[in-house]
Image (cartoon, rainbow, N blue to C red):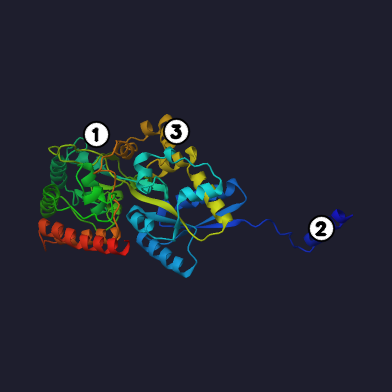
Amino acid sequence: MRFKSLALAGAALMTLGLSVPAHAQTEIQWWHSMGGALGEWVTDLANQFNASQKEYKVVPTFKGSYGESMTAAIAAFRAGNAPDILQVFEVGTATMMYSKGAIKPVAEVMKQAGVNFDPNAYVPAVAGYYTAPNGQMLSMPFNSSTAVFYYNKDAFKAAGLDPNKPPKTWPEVVLAAGKLKASGSKCPFTTSWISWTQLENFSAWHNVLFSSLNNGFGGLGTRLEVNSPLHLRHFENLANMSKQGLFVYKGRDNAADATVVSGECAMATASAGLLGNLKRNAKFDFGVSTLPYYPDVPGAPQNSVIGGASLWVMSGKKPEVYKGVGEFLAYLAKPEVAAASHQRTGYLPVTKAAYELTEKSGFYKKNPGAEVAVEQMIKKTTDKSRGIRIGNFLQVRTIADEETEGIWSGKQTPKQALDNIVKRGNEQLERFQKANR
C-alpha cells in the first residue's frame, strides 16, 4: 500500500508539472588556460567524460593565461573557494610543490578515489618532471609539449631551398634565412617563448646546464648558468641575425605563433602544441623538424625538455569531489582518449600506451612531423637534460624576456643581457630558497 501511495504521489507531481528530484551530480570545477582551438579540445574532453557517466559533471572554466590562472587560483585558495583542478604550466611546478597545504598529490587522490593508477604507464621524461624526490607523482601530465622547429615549405620553394630538407643546425638556419630574405621574406626566422626555446631547451639539447644542482632537481640552492661560452655564442649569433633582418623578434610568450600560422614568418621554434593550429588554419604546406643545434658541441643533440602544463588537485575538498577528480583523471589517461588528444593537438602522448596506439594506427605515416616531438623526448635523459625545476620560474622567464629584448633593440650586448639574467635571476632563486627553507 505504501509503494502504491508513493507512486500516486509521484504521478501527481508530474501532473502539476513538477519533477521528482534526481540524484544530484557532483560538480568538478576545472580552471584552465586553453583558448581557441585548444579551448574547444578541453571543452570536448569534459563533455565526453560527462556523457560517459552520471555521477559527476566536470565544469571547465577558462581563466586567462597560465600566469593569470595561477594568480587567480592562489587568491581563490586564500579566500577558501579554489577550483578542484587547476592547470598549471611547468614553470609553476616548483611553486606548487612547495605550496604547503594548498595541493593534494595526484597519487594520493587516485588512491583515495580507489582508481587504478600506475605512474610507470606515463612517458618517463614527462612523468619524471612532475614527480617528487620520494617517487610520488604530484600532478597529472596533461598538455605536455616540447619545442620543435617549423618551416614553410612553400616559402622554401620560392627561395630555391629544398622543402624536404629543413635546416638541422644553426649554421644551416642562418644560410636558409639569408635565402628566404633574398626571396622577399620579411621574417625569415622567429621564435616563441624565447627563454623556453633559446635558453631552456637550447641547454638540454646541447647537454649543458641551465642552472646548477642539475637544473634545480638537486635542491633549492640552484643558480643560473646561462652566461656560459656556449650560451653567449648562441645569442651573439641571434643578435647578428637580428641586425641583418634574418631573425625577427615578435614578442613575448607565444606571440610569434600567429605569424607562423599566417605565413608571415618562414621558420620558427615553437611549441609542439602549435601543430594542431597549423593543421587547421595554415594556407600553405609546412614541415616540422627537430631543433637546430651546433654540430661541434659534444653530446648534441641530446633531448629537449618538457613544456605545457599538468593538472594539480587542490586541497580541502570533500571525498566525493576527490572521487570524481580521480575518475576524470583516469578517463583522460585512457589510451584511446590520450591518443586522440595527442593526435588532435600535437601535444605529446603522455602515456606509453597512447604513443603505441597512435603508432599502430598509422597516424605518424599519414602526418609527417607529428612524431618529431615524441622522438626528441624519448631519449634517455642526463642530469643536465631531465628538465628545469626552479623556484620563481615565472619571474626568471620575465627577466629573460626583458634582458634579451635589450639585445634586439640594440640597447645592450648579448654578454650584458646574459650576465644580467644570471644576476637578477639568482636574486629570485635566493628569495625562493629563503622562503622555503
> For this view, does 15 lie left or right of residue 179?
right
- Tell me the distance, in whole angstroms, between the alpha carbons under discs 1 and 2: 71 Å
Which of labels 1 and 3 is toward the front?
3
Taking depth in this image into account, of 64 and 27 the one nearest to the observer is: 27
Q: Which type of secondary structure does the marked residue at label 1 adopt?
A: loop
Q: CA distance from mark 1 to mark 3?
A: 27 Å
**Residue occupied by mark 3:** 357
* Residue 239: x %, y % from top left: 12, 53
The residue labelled by disc 1 is 164
Q: Which residue is mark 2?
A: 11
Amino acid type, label 3: Leu
Q: Which residue type does callout 1 highlight? A: Asn
State the SS at label 2.
helix
Q: Residue at x 44, y 35 (%)?
A: 353
Residue 146's spot in the image, x, y percent? 31, 45
Question: Label 1 crowding class (10 Å Cα cut-off): few <14, some 14-19, many 20+?
Answer: few
Q: Which circle's residue, 3 or 2, is located before the other in the chain? A: 2
Residue type highlighted by circle 2: Ala
